Amino acid sequence: MKGGLMSLAALSLPLGGWLAGCAKTQSTDVNSATPAAKLNTLSSSPKTQQAQQQLWQQADAIVKSIAPTQFAARDFLITQFGAVAGADCTNAIAKAIAACAQAGGGRVMVPEGRWLTGAVHLKSNVNLHLQKNAVLAFSTDPKAYLPYVFTRWEGVELMGYSPLIYAFEQDNIAITGEGILEGGGSNTNWWPWKGKWKHTPWQLDAATDQQQTRAPLFAMAEAGVPVAERVFEKNFLRPPFIQPYRCSRVLIEGVTIRNSPFWLVNPVLCTDVIVRGVNFVSHGPNSDGCDPESCNRVLIENCLFDTGDDCIALKSGRNNDGRRLATPVQNVVIQDCMMKSGHGGVVIGSEISGGANHIFARRLRMSSPDLERGLRIKTNSLRGGLIDTVALTDIEIGEVKDAIVINFYYEEGDAGDHLPLVQNIFVSNLHVKKAKRIFEVRGLPRAPVGLVQLSNVTIDQAEIGVVEGAPQLVLDNVRYNGKPLQL
């Protein structure tokens, strides 16, 4: 694996014997119509502790391997390039970025005040820095995001609206500071393009429904139409807020991101990405917080997620387009974050056809009546993909609907020939105070879920839920309502 420290082969060497031993102790196939299957409950073992230690040594090594950004000590104040508070500053910001890049890099400074802009395109060695009490407010006019750029939307490449902040094939870029990035998504701007939504607080308008573009785009991808030809005169696909594309050494730190048209932070095909101390606050449709797609070496830490969709969702392309690029999301560490509302805390999928491996999450706190799931893996037989080696530890869940979800029937059900493979999922030191259900684990009869181990887990209050198509679910010191969990 280019530039990476952790390979599947490397993992299998220290853990191979232990994994094989676990497989021998599993219960028989649990495909059934019963609410939960009968599973073995194992006592805590030194082998489990040793394997956990080895996993988290790998996580530490990933963090150390990430190449950091470095910027020259030069500042370029946007007011020096014609920016005026309350006026359109698009051109002034572009000039400041160009001057900064031409000089060899530095910081483009957005001072205190409210500054209006269209699309911002970052260049190598440029740090867009928002000072305290600075608000960079983005236009809600789609024309402000033309001409079209090479982008990815729900895991499919196309020529589409520029993301609000975009970088293509750049190195050493950053967005930092204590200021606010305001996306302008609302019940009257951007969000109504979703069409019918779970809340649908807007007037439905078939003329601007995203399905007019979404369905043809997906059909083009399945047919193998070249990306340069995936262009739509009537385009109702909302742009993501921040999307570095094929970039290296990316830092997003300190800022607050609000009211995004679509996904908030969406690095695609990037290496060495750090997202640190960011407040993700957006309650619109598809307001995913941080969605690294097909990225290698990613650190997400000390962030707050208060979102209308998944807090963190790891992705690698949808169906044929994901298989065409065949680039997994891998070597990801998530740590010391708080998840409030959202569809899921740590999520893998559903656009996961390129696969995912070596995903680590630790020291997370999740709690909200509006948080739907803790750990969530969502895929189906149209997506396929290999999801291998996912580890979570020291997770505190105050209130959630479903604690652990692995669903092979997401959206389209079992309708394809690309069977998902999910294996080596380890959850340890998990405390759930209140949940509607512990499990929604549903493998396919022809493609069951692989090894999933829960160790040192305590659930105070919850229904057990559903387990089917998961013959390798191992419980190691799992307590439920004060007693060892017996299923």
Image (cartoon, helix red, strand yellow):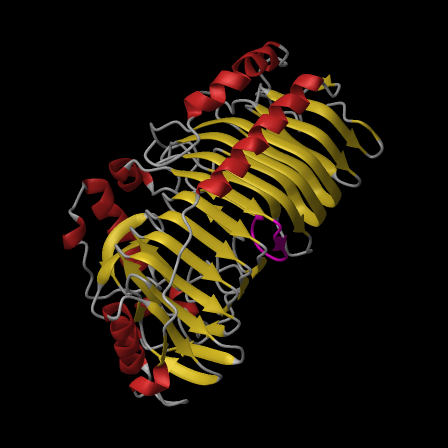
Q: Is residue 313 magenta?
A: no
Quarter location, residue 153: bottom left
Magenta stretch: dominant SS?
A: loop
Q: Is residue 33 above or below residue 321?
A: above
Q: Residue 292, how many percent across, how many down?
A: 42, 49
In the rendered image, is residue 474 in sight? Answer: no
On the rendered structure, is 267 left or right of 278? Answer: left
Tell me the quarter of the image containing the N terminus. top left
On the rendered structure, is 193 left or right of 227? Answer: right
Tell me the quarter of the image containing the C terminus. top right
* Residue in view at x 69 percent, y 28 percent: 455
Quarter location, residue 171: bottom left
Q: Which residues are magenta?
A: 336-345
Q: Is residue 92 above or below residue 72?
A: below
Q: Is residue 342 magenta?
A: yes
In the rendered image, is residue 354 in sight? Answer: yes
* Residue in view at x 71 percent, y 45 percent: 396
In front: 90, or 277? 277
Q: Residue 170, how many percent across, how many down?
A: 28, 57
* Residue in view at x 62 percent, y 27 percent: 52
In front: 160, or 335? 335
Q: Residue furthest right?
A: 482
Q: Residue 282, how many percent across, how many down?
A: 52, 65
In front: 447, or 331? 331
Q: Is residue 31 above or below residue 228?
A: above
Quarter location, residue 78: bottom left
Q: Residue furthest front?
A: 73
